[in-house]
Amino acid sequence: MPAVVVVAVVMVMFALGYRYYSRYLADRVYGLDPTYVTPAHQFTDGVDFVPTNRHVLFGHHFTSVAGAAPIVGPAIAVFWGWGPALAWVVLGTIFAAGVHDFGALAVSVRHRARNIGTLAADVISKRARVLFLLIIFFLLTLVNAVFAVVIGNLLVAYPGAVIPIFVEIPLAIAIGQYIYRTRRPALVPSIAGVIILYVLIWVGNIWPIEITGLADQLGFAQPRDLWVIILFAYTFVASRLPVWLLLQPRDYINSHQLFIALAVIFVGVLVGLDRIVAPLVNDVPAGSPSIFPFLFITVACGAISGFHSLVASGTTAKQLDRETDARYVGYAGAIGEGSLALGSIIAVTAGVAASRAEWDSLYATHAAASGGATRNFVNGIASFAANLGVEFQLATVFAAVVVISFAATTMDTGVRLQRYIVQEIAELVGGRRVARNLTLAGLLAIAAPLALALLPGGGDAGYTFGVLWRLFGTTNQLTAGLALAVIAVWVLRRRRNPVAVVVPLVFLLAMTTWALIVQLREFVRADEWVLAPLDALIFVLAVWLIVEAVLALRRASGPAAEAEAIPGPRPAPDVTGAERGAEPTDSAAASSGGEPRR
Amino acid sequence: MSRHRVLLVRPWGAGRADSGCCSGAGIISDVSGRDPGRARQLGTQRPLGEVYLTVRAGLPTEVEVEVVNPDNTLFLLPAVVRDGRRHGRPWRVVLRQLARATGYAAIIVDGRVVSDATAPTPERALRLIRQALDAPRR
């Protein structure tokens, strides 16, 4: 099958999903009202709350949600064949991610643009706030562990990427300093940064840096472990730096790289007319993880990602000009993420191998598929770049640098965020010393993911990347489940049909708990006494979430919710008057969907 | 779409970096409320916020006024090109404006940068914008 045909068909399906299904959601489920006064108008301050054109906001939202995660999951999931992986990405994007991202934005806009964690406390129960923090804690632990392993594997496999990746750090700091101190425009220096980075890719390709010998001398079981330690030491320091000093300029360089990589994928496929050589449905070896439920855990980002609810309900909701813009920004943002997953599937089914036999050797077992996922993606992208005339070896380093850059930035912010969550939880349980000591909180933030990324295991059931990735996918789906539960309760309270929200919610929770039970059994049988309790804890959170969601849905469908069903109009506030600049407060009566209109 | 568009670019260092799916510094304070960079961010953003409020109140509603992050190149760069070309500016001028468009607290009127490097007072910003709107197209 020509890859370009698959790309065209999927794009048509995404367009139909946007045209018809998101319209149904907007009109019949979320009941968007073009006259509703959004928080951006209600609390305009020019800083956080700014009525923003939907195209501007889409650019902000998309660059906030697009990253490395939708690449890895699909690159593993094609193990079951490209058909199931693609079907889940397409159907998940249209019927789950679109509903979730769009819904999180819609419900937040009706609740003074508050974040999904606060909304969970308001809409579901006070306990849901603690549940939210715990889910985010486990999610970040696994994010940091899996991305450390991804980067470590890539630096070992592509030693040519070491120089560009490590020089990118002082380069980004220098660019950030230059822009910040001189107040010069950022575009030219950041493009110069990308050019320097690409020169460094050429340099790195000539002088690759291998650490295998050093790792052996230091007694590491595998060289990846040395990289993992270096990475966590780096993120521990980097997460203490101000955002503008390193993270922001590196993000700027990354945003250019994202568009270049996307162009390489889609133009490369068009020029090379590559064919998909992977099987539509793969006859996997006996003993491999079952497609149900594991496909739906393996591909989280790219089909549905709970993290998007954090972006949608945080920064995006504060800037929505008209409530009806939520459809374009939220739903189309989900489609953008689905397109990245599509690019990943194309790279690992059409770009990475020239024949079925070659592909079969790369995806012989689930462990090989998961362990080699990012390498397969990198080689696939490199072959597309080769279609455009770039030398293959150089192109592999280019693709590795793109993936590592995104993964490293994700780790940097992941560790930063984890430190805040540790402090928050410490405060909740009375651990003031931890809450106030940044170094201690930072050490605690990296301890668990470092242990997960380093501890040795045996075979498929041990600390292989695939197992960590599945646990990560599980917790990401739980975050999405929590957001969908909030959205479903809100929809039900408004006396609208919540089926479009409840179906993905039930499906996700069913797949998640099923996968957790199967994995728990595997871990116990294999005497994996770190993974088993971790899995059991996440299972407890999943059950807790199911109970909270059922109770909240029952309450919402009861007569007590009637008063919230049809909100009455209020006079539109004067955005230039007294309310201007007012910060929304938690105590405000926004929990039921305070409903000002224009 | 309105005939005139004013773009106010957030000061560098004040915008909130986002790092893609599964992290994102932009969500830090929304998740935990503990972002120590928040006070600094507000300090650098507030002058632009004041500019926005004054400009928005002082211009007719037909004039579109947008606040844009400097790293939102997906929107910002095509918008500057589109606005510049729509108002008859030659490519050479458009490209020069494009290079300046991501400047610190840049104010862009119909694809032309009328102020950057420092956030002007709200009154001065409004005056600059009005002058640019009234000026003949070049």
Image (tube, rainbow, N blue to C red):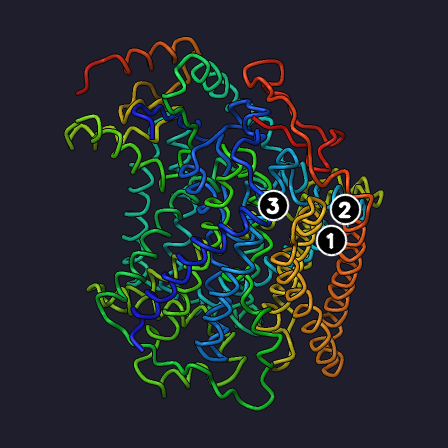
Helix, strand or loop at mark 2: helix
Report how far apart the C-alphas of labels 3 and 1 lie in the structure: 16 Å
* Residue at numbered disc 1: A134
Labels 2 and 1 positioned on one and the same chain: yes
Going by the numbered disc 3, the residue's amino acid type is Arg
Chain letter for the residue marked with disc 2 in the picture: A
Going by the numbered disc 2, the residue's amino acid type is Ile
User: In this rendering, does residue A248 appear at all?
Assistant: yes
Report how far apart the C-alphas of labels 2 and 1 lie in the structure: 8 Å
Chain letter for the residue marked with disc 1 in the picture: A
Q: Earlier in the sequence, mark 2 or mark 1?
A: 1
Residue A379: image location, x then y, percent: 35, 70
Looking at the image, which residue sits at the far bottom? Answer: A286
In this rendered view, identify the residue nearer to me: A133 or A403.
A133
Chain letter for the residue marked with disc 3 in the picture: A
* Residue at numbered disc 3: A416
Q: Is residue A204 left or right of residue A71?
A: left
Going by the numbered disc 1, the residue's amino acid type is Leu
Residue A178: image location, x then y, percent: 37, 31
Report how far apart the C-alphas of labels 3 and 2 lie in the structure: 15 Å
Mark nearest the camera among 3 and 1 is 1
Q: Residue at x 35, y 27 (%)?
A: B103
Q: Is residue B3 left or right of residue A340?
A: left
Q: Residue at x 61, y 72 (%)?
A: A467
Residue A425 bears which disc, if any? 2
Residue B118: image location, x then y, percent: 39, 18
